[in-house]
Image (tube, grey):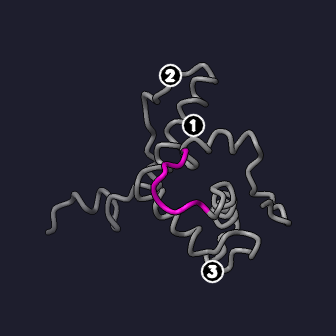
Amino acid sequence: MARQNAYPTDLNDAEWALLAPWLDPPRTRQGRPRTVARRDIVDALFYQLRTGCQWRYLPPEFPNWETVYWYFSRWRDDGTWVRINDTLRRRVRVALGREAEPSAAIVDSQSAKTTEKGASAASTPAS
């Protein structure tokens, strides 16, 4: 059943087609039948991510917040989001004519703290 309200964070059909193989695999005969569409779960997750709302304050058009949070936790803990991110990053790099895996990394010295006093104070012997 389609939701009545659409949000700017909702996936379009092409975006869902990229994510669906990881998030909506075919059901086996075991377990309870699904009652919540995975696409609605992902739309709720993207809404929460973009707005920063508390889980309990997801709009009522989305599945129950506890269900949404359960899927988020499950996919986070089993590495689903990491696998999706890695695969999509590789596809974008190849589409841009680059190697699938990056060959270098940059560490911003403004972000990587050495000590609270700074590198020279930390390496100077105390007198």
Classify mark 1: helix, strand or loop. Answer: helix
Instruction: Give the amino acid type for the residue marked by disc 3 in the picture.
Output: Arg
Instruction: Give the amino acid type for the residue marked by disc 1 in the picture.
Output: Leu
**Rendered image quadrant of residue 19:** top right
Residue 45 in the image, given as x and y percentages of width and height: 63, 62
Q: Please tell me how crowded label 1 is: few (under 14), some (14-19), or many (20+) other residues with Cα within 10 Å.
A: some
Which numbered disc, 1 or 3, marks the residue that appears first in the sequence? 3
Which numbered disc, 1 or 2, marks the residue that appears first in the sequence? 1
Q: Are marks 1 and 2 in contact (CB under 8 Å)?
A: no
> Of circles 1 and 3, which is in front?
3
Q: Please tell me how crowded label 2 is: few (under 14), some (14-19), or many (20+) other residues with Cα within 10 Å.
A: few
Relative to 8, 79 lies left or right: left
38 or 46: nearer the eye? 38
Residue 108 in the image, given as x and y percentages of width and height: 47, 48
Residue 83 in the image, given as x and y percentages of width and height: 47, 43
Q: Which residues are magenta?
A: 26-34
> Of circles 1 and 2, which is in front?
1
Is 28 magenta? The answer is yes
Q: Residue furthest top?
A: 97
Residue at 80% across, 64% down: 3
24 or 79: nearer the eye? 24
Q: Please tell me how crowded label 3 is: few (under 14), some (14-19), or many (20+) other residues with Cα within 10 Å.
A: few
Instruction: Give the amino acid type for the residue marked by disc 2 in the picture.
Output: Glu
Q: In this figure, which residue is indicated by the disc labeled 3?
A: 56
Residue 36 in the image, given as x and y percentages of width and height: 64, 63
Residue at 43% across, 31% down: 104
Q: Are marks 1 and 3 in contact (CB under 8 Å)?
A: no
